[in-house]
Image (cartoon, coloured by chain):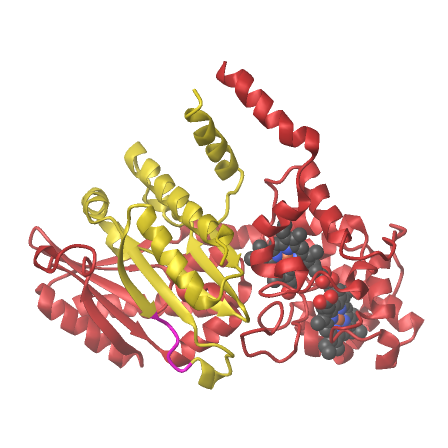
Chain colours: A red, B yellow
Amino acid sequence: MVLAWLAVLLSQPLLAGPDGAELFSRHCVACHGEEGRGGVGVPLALPAFLESVDDRFLTVTIREGRPGRVMPSFRTLSDAQIQAIVSYIRSWTDRPTPTFDPAPIQGDAQRGARLFASHCAGCHGPEGRGGHGTGVTFSRPRDLPIIAPALRNRGFLAAASDRLIRATLVRGREGTPMVPATSLGLDDRDIDDIVAYIRSLESTLHDERRRLQEKHDAEPTVLMEESSYTLEETVENVKQAIVGKNYRVVRVQRLEEGLVPEDQVNPRQVVVYFCNFNQLNQALAIDPRVGLFLPCRITVVEEKGVVRVYSTNPGRMAHFFNNDELKELCEEMSRTYEEILEEATL
Amino acid sequence: MRSILPILLLLLSFTARAEDLMMVRSTLSFPEAMVTLQNTIRDYGYTLSRVQRVDIGLTSFGFKTDKYRIVFFGKAEENRRMIARRPELVAYLPLKIAIFAEEDDTLLVAANPVKWLEGLVEDEELRIQFERWRNDLQAILEDVRRAEE
């Protein structure tokens, strides 16, 4: 009976087809903005973008995402759902959808590498690793109104055929900093060489992501040290160690403050919040979502006479942001946490 | 029968989204979204413990807005019970949602406890609790996303 009901309910949306607008607002709007204006993600509604990419590019980008460049993969969406999102994106323009011959383009990748370094790397980063930060400039400080995407990226290279890349270079993307290659003084041969170079980046990716995944899996979820001091002494030690690392203590409070009436708060759980404003602002400029682990925090607890010091592990969290630029910063934070934990307890 | 269908459907839609981070955009202005968020958190039975500003000097660093806050909330009894089960959870609790302005919109982000705390799961009770937190966070974000002026 339940199954029959369920079948009826499930078949209804299937018969009607998935709702692309609803799927887009559920899964994409947070980053790409209402109607694809852009945000943490690049704008998607520009006619110059839509008329230079085929549906395969959109489909594969949604399915694979852009590993290490914030855009997640949506492997859990069905083909029909992805198709509905693509149709919805297409509804923003009345220009025809291009198609590209999948045949590869021949060129001199080494010569392309030199041209890329001199003409493209300024925006797309060395080896096409992408500009600093992602998306558009709305609220964060950036170098460009739109940050150049990573090209040395498995998701991009899987989505873009050689001829799509060439068409993008030839036309540029009007309304974005991406200008036509001819205006950079490049001719047809130069363009083919650059396309060959971009394609050759695929072979430099190796199993980078798998190694990162393994590293992530090996990271502990929480860092912890046992203290040989009393709770009060340990809190003081933590504060001193924090200052010694060039951070500022912003707040010391009991964990349960605000959650239970004042007289019921457990006094043996103390949270020390601290911050390095330079680091905070740098992190927010790279990825505004980092507020989830900032300001920094260390928790000191006494339980059955044993004092322990805990912190989350930013080195592990970096992975969840799918943002390679954050990795270094997070690893640095993890080291700082470990040092503070050790100094405060030894 | 009727009453379990919405739950089943809810479960189906949740399992379809295995995200590490949960983020939504609200078309409400920052102050409106903030009020809506706090009310929604209370509607789900949580106590708001604190709103932390993360905006000190943001504008002097070139940001166009300093509207950035972390909202902390929890259920005291639940937190105590779970910390007794798994002391490491003191490093993670109370739950939080980051909320910040982007032009006229407001963005809200939460970490998915099922993913972030994966390494702390050692029995059914913990697994179910992390899923419950995930579902509540997701539902709170979804309610704010759908809220209109």
Span colored in magenta: B53-57
The quadrant in which residue B55 appears is bottom left
The quadrant in which residue A134 appears is bottom right
Indicate the position of residue B109 as horizontal and vertical percent values: 45, 58
Residue drawn at the location 77% of the way across and 55% of the way down: A160
Is residue A70 at all visible to an observer of this figure?
no
In the picture provided, is B61 more to the left or to the right than A151?
left
As drawn, the residue found furthest toward the front would be B149
* Label total for image: 0
Magenta-span inclusion, residue A165: no
Residue drawn at the location 69% of the way across and 47% of the way down: A85
Q: Main secondary structure of the magenta part?
A: loop
In the picture provided, is B38 more to the left or to the right than A250?
right
In the displayed structure, would residue B20 be above or below residue A283? above
In the picture provided, is B54 more to the left or to the right than A62?
left
Is residue A248 at all visible to an observer of this figure?
yes
Q: Quadrant of the N terminus of chain B?
A: top left
The quadrant in which residue A253 appears is bottom left
As drawn, the residue found furthest toward the right would be A188
Indicate the position of residue B83 as horizontal and vertical percent values: 21, 47
Q: Nearer the viewer, residue A34 or A243?
A: A34
In the displayed structure, would residue B9 be above or below residue B18? above
